[in-house]
Amino acid sequence: MAPLGPNESERRRYERFAIQGNAFAVLLSDTPRLGQIIDISRGGMSFRYVDDAGAISDRADLDIFLLNQPVLMKSVAVRSRCDFQIEPRKSSTSETVRRCCVEFVALGPGHSYALDELLQHHTQSMT
């Protein structure tokens, strides 16, 4: 994360953490999409995905899981905060890769517990 300038302040309510290992989100919609989680916090997360059906809708549910493990969080309600195109890692690909930032909406007790476990055991601080 880039350092803040002298007249800037962090606007995020929760500290973001980088994911260690491979964590994924599956957007549960008419057109399901798989994305790799980039970072996560108590308030939301961001993930990258291959755009094959346009930008993600404003509200949706998603599942969160770790590679080779069962689903950690099922049907998490999220609200899209931003969705933008990013540069692909390999210049030879013609796929459009996007980054979507979502806010968690009304986490239940089971979701909160699973999120705490994910933050404690599968992340590292970005500061």
Image (cartoon, helix red, strand yellow):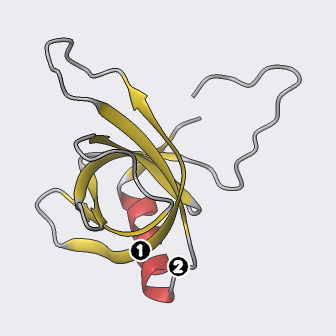
The residue at the point 41 percent across, 74 percent down is: 76
Q: Residue furthest bottom?
A: 109
Quarter of the figure with residue 82? top right
Quarter placement of the N terminus: top right
Quarter of the figure with residue 88? top left
- Say if mark 2 contacts mark 1, CB within 8 Å: yes
Picture layout, residue 75 above or below residue 96: below
Q: Is residue 46 left or right of residue 126?
A: left
Picture layout, residue 109 above or below residue 22: below
The residue at the point 27 percent across, 29 percent down is: 96
The residue at the point 23 percent across, 48 percent down is: 22
Residue 38 or residue 102, whichever sits in front: 102
Task: Specify the amino acid type for callout 1.
Answer: Val
Q: Residue furthest left?
A: 68
**What count of labels does the image hold?**
2
Residue 19, x across and y down, in percent: 37, 47
Precedes in sequence: disc 2 or disc 1 = 1
Query: Callout 2: few (<14), some (14-19), or many (20+) C-alpha neighbours within 10 Å?
Result: some
Quarter placement of the C terminus: top right
The residue at the point 25 percent across, 20 percent down is: 89
Residue 33 or residue 89, whichever sits in front: 33
Residue 18, x across and y down, in percent: 44, 43
Secondary-structure class at tag 1: strand
Residue 5, x across and y down, in percent: 79, 20
Picture layout, residue 107 above or below residue 36: below
Q: Which mark is residue 76?
A: 1
Task: Specify the amino acid type for callout 2.
Answer: Leu
Picture layout, residue 81 above or below residue 103: above
Find disc 2 in the rendering and name its residue. 107
